[in-house]
Image (cartoon, rainbow, N blue to C red):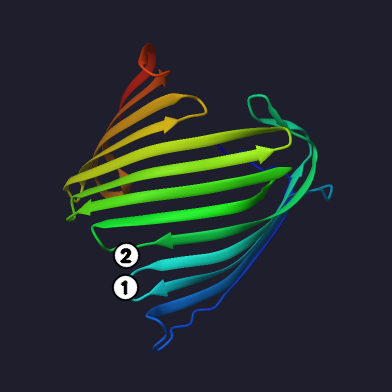
Amino acid sequence: GYVKRLGYKKVLFRILNRTRPKDLFGLLEIRPHITYYSYWKLDGFQETGYLHIDSHWEFRNGFRIDTGINFRTEGVSEAFEIVEGTIVPKGTFNNKEIHIRTNTNLTKPLSVTMTNTIGGFFSGNRRNTNTTLRFRFGDRFTSDLISRYNDVDLPEGQFVTHLIRSRLTYAISPSVYIQSLLQYNNQSDQWSMNWRFIWQQSAATGLYIVYNQTQDYDGIPIASSTKSFVVK
């Protein structure tokens, strides 16, 4: 989730260059860039600092690789429980991490995108892998299988989070389509499902029929679950 920032000062800048080589190892475009942003509370305490130094290497065959390094600052004004039983202490944490992203040709019916981030995380280390497998059939059907994996090792405790998501969309016509989302979160040990029928008119108005279900899971589904059905 996200926590709204209240009463802060912010600095943000970005520098980017695009170069298109005439003939260099099949490269279409190289995009070196630097991004920096930082948030301070009004009393001068730095809550967040982020310096991203990266280059995108995009090839003519649609393959792309990003090679970057991030420098992060996290200011924790009050200790908090990041997962059950693991407390992140108060303090300022300065870390760096390696960031590598790759994707195959996204215009093909089948494509894969993978992002790996390895480095510091608060008082310890984190290994993060995000993977998306995408399949598209014509202009009517698209599907995504998404994995979000984090292996975190802190002096205060070690934990793994894994979010698995499947998303399907079928277009009956340009304005009428069906969407479904199935998700599993290992931290809450919970399945959730969302189905939507959408008949869209102009300016995002139209008919929306939505069904949601959340079910605990401990090896087999149990009887208790949360369901909702909405028409708007």
Q: Can residue 122 be seen in this view?
A: no
Q: What residue type is labelled 1?
A: Asn
Q: Residue at x 49, y 70 (%)?
A: 56
Name the element at disc 2.
loop
Which residue is under mark 2?
Answer: 105
Image quarter hosting the N terminus:
top right
| Above or below, comparing residue 6 to residue 224 in the picture | below
Name the residue at 39% across, 56% down: 113
Q: Do the residues labelled 1 and 2 touch (CB within 8 Å)?
A: yes
Query: Which dot marks residue 61?
Result: 1
Lateral position of residue 58 relative to residue 51, left or right: left
Give the quarter of the image for residue 59.
bottom left
Quarter of the image for residue 157 reads: top right
- Residue 51, percent across and down? 67, 62
Q: What element carries label 1?
A: loop
Q: Which residue occupies 42% across, 43% down?
A: 147
Looking at the picture, how far across and down is residue 81, in whole percent?
A: 68, 29
